[in-house]
Image: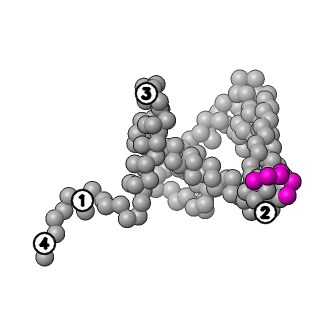
Amino acid sequence: MRESPDPRRAQGKRYPLPYLLLFTVLALLSGARSDRGIITRQEQRRVETFDVAGCLGGDWDRLIAAAARVTRLTWYKNTRSGLWDKTEETSLYVSQISLSAAAFGAAIRQHWGIENRNNYVRDVSFFEDHSRIRTKPGHFARLCSFALTISSSPTAPTPSAANSTSTP
């Protein structure tokens, strides 16, 4: 199976093909009769933008030019009953520049992609989820952020470069 070529595009590949095929077969064996029976989550987002320049008053007028409201409707399939449960969430965002709804949506998605990758690194490298620090945990989080920023800097020395000695 691992030697089978993967026909999917590189963009959007979230799971390795052998695992995807395995879970598809398991879903079909457990009663799913189509690809829609395998899907357990459906999400719909609506991004609305508002021009708020000059509407806020005081110092806020020069800081905020646009606002966005993102309404997310998510349906989760209950695997026991087969019924769909609904959740709704509304998030508000502001920007210093005017953006279209599509640009706002893309910026928000990009931000959360970065945030999720950052959290993964923090959890794996610094074991933040296992931390027992209860007194001022924000200090430890800032130190982790500082270390992560330094280590991901393109000018940061690599361990091999730091341990090597150069001779003229």
Disc 4 residue type (three-letter): Thr
Q: Nearer the viewer, mark 3 or mark 4?
A: 3
Q: Looking at the picture, tell me which residue is in the foreground, 44 or 134.
A: 134
Q: Which residues are magenta?
A: 54-59
Q: Nearer the viewer, mark 4 or mark 2?
A: 2
Distance between mark 3 and mark 4 Cα atoms: 45 Å
Pointers 3 and 1 in contact (C-beta within 8 Å) = no
Name which of mark 2 and mark 1 comes first in the sequence.
Answer: 2
Distance between mark 3 and mark 2 Cα atoms: 41 Å
Name which of mark 3 and mark 4 comes first in the sequence.
Answer: 3
**Residue occupied by mark 1:** 162
Disc 2 residue type (three-letter): Ser
Disc 3 residue type (three-letter): Ile
* Residue in the image at 74% along x and 33% along y: 76
Q: Nearer the viewer, mark 2 or mark 1?
A: 2
Residue 70 falls left or right of residue 145: right
Element marked by disc 2: loop
Q: Is residue 60 above or below residue 35?
A: below
Does any portion of residue 66 appear in the rendered image?
A: no
Does any portion of residue 166 appear in the rendered image?
A: yes
Instruction: Check the image and name the residue furthest to the front.
Output: 58
* Residue in the image at 79% along x and 52% along y: 58
Distance between mark 1 and mark 4 Cα atoms: 14 Å
- Within the image, what quadrant is residue 77 found in? top right
**Residue occupied by mark 4:** 167
Any magenta on residue 15?
no
- Mark identifier at residue 133: 3
